Amino acid sequence: DADVTQTPRNRITKTGKRIMLECSQTKGHDRMYWYRQDPGLGLRLIYYSFDVKDINKGEISDGYSVSRQAQAKFSLSLESAIPNQTALYFCATRPDREETQYFGPGTRLLVL
Amino acid sequence: GESVGLHLPTLSVQEGDNSIINCAYSNSASDYFIWYKQESGKGPQFIIDIRSNMDKRQGQRVTVLLNKTVKHLSLQIAATQPGDSAVYFCAENGAGGGNKLTFGTGTQLKVEL
């Protein structure tokens, strides 16, 4: 099932570098989300978007920015990566009339 | 703040047995709950959901039970199979409707042959 795709799947970068994680979806959902997952913690919301002109901060947005280039694309950027941003990052989508979120396969990021 | 928690971090069951995974929630305003399955190296996969106007909902080999009195949610997997081995976590929609979900930390289910 490739309804929600994320690129890259794995990334190693150095402290201070700028990187972008990309998410694309073919589900036609307006709502998109970015989460990070750390061992022993639940998924934590970074940013979410209800449509191309709507961007909202989640609980841990510091150090991150996003861009909603189109309904189908939602990118997450780390302007200056730091080691504690090492984590699994997931993109999710959600149709307007439902509450279920559908997740991509994730990006594993290592910041050295 | 509000949180969603799980009672057991790891659950081991024999193949063929039934599994029960529990979740406690503390936000009494939540009216929607979801169970996800996450296999190693993959994203969370939707299993089943339930609204607060229901006590029980059944899917294929899975049943979700909701006890609003004690704020408890459980996932029952019948005839557990090796392919059921994964991390399972619950999520709730919290206060203010379904714009955001709050996720639990997860329970690792291990199926022994």
Image (cartoon, coloured by chain):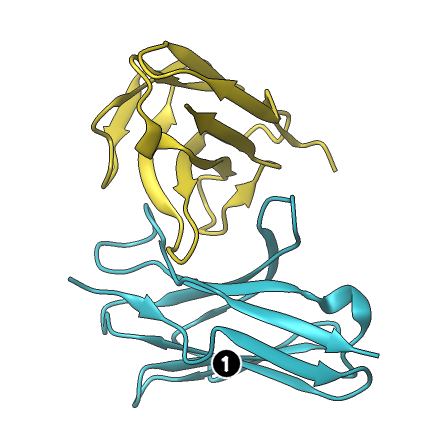
Three-letter amino acid code at the position of disc 1: Ser
Letter of the chain in cyan:
B
Q: Is residue B51 above or below residue A81?
A: below
Work out whether residue B79 or residue B60 is closer to the camera in this orientation and state it: B79
Q: Quadrant of residue B33?
A: bottom left
x and y percentages locating residue A61 in the rendered image: 24, 31
How many marks do you count on the picture? 1
Q: Which residue does the numbered mark 1 point to in the structure image?
A: B74
Q: Is residue B59 above or below residue B17?
A: above
Residue at the spot 23% in from the left edge and 68% down from the top edge: B29
- From this viewpoint, is residue A48 visible? no
- From this viewpoint, is residue B11 visible? yes
x and y percentages locating residue A110 in the rendered image: 47, 28
> Does residue B82 appear left or right of residue A82 in this picture?
right
x and y percentages locating residue A52 in the rendered image: 38, 17
Work out whether residue B20 or residue A98 is closer to the camera in this orientation and state it: B20
> Does residue A3 appear left or right of residue A82 in this picture?
right
Work out whether residue B86 or residue A57 is closer to the camera in this orientation and state it: B86
Q: Is residue A86 above or below residue A101?
A: above
Mark 1 belongs to chain: B
Letter of the chain in yellow:
A
Work out whether residue B3 or residue B99 is closer to the camera in this orientation and state it: B3
Residue at the spot 24% in from the left edge and 23% down from the top edge: A63
Quadrant housing the N terminus of chain B: bottom left
> Does residue B37 appear left or right of residue B94 in this picture?
right
Residue at the spot 41% in from the left edge and 23% down from the top edge: A112
Q: Quadrant of residue B80?
A: bottom right
Quick one: label 1, few (<14), some, or many (20+) residues within 10 Å? some
Q: Is residue B21 above or below residue A48?
A: below
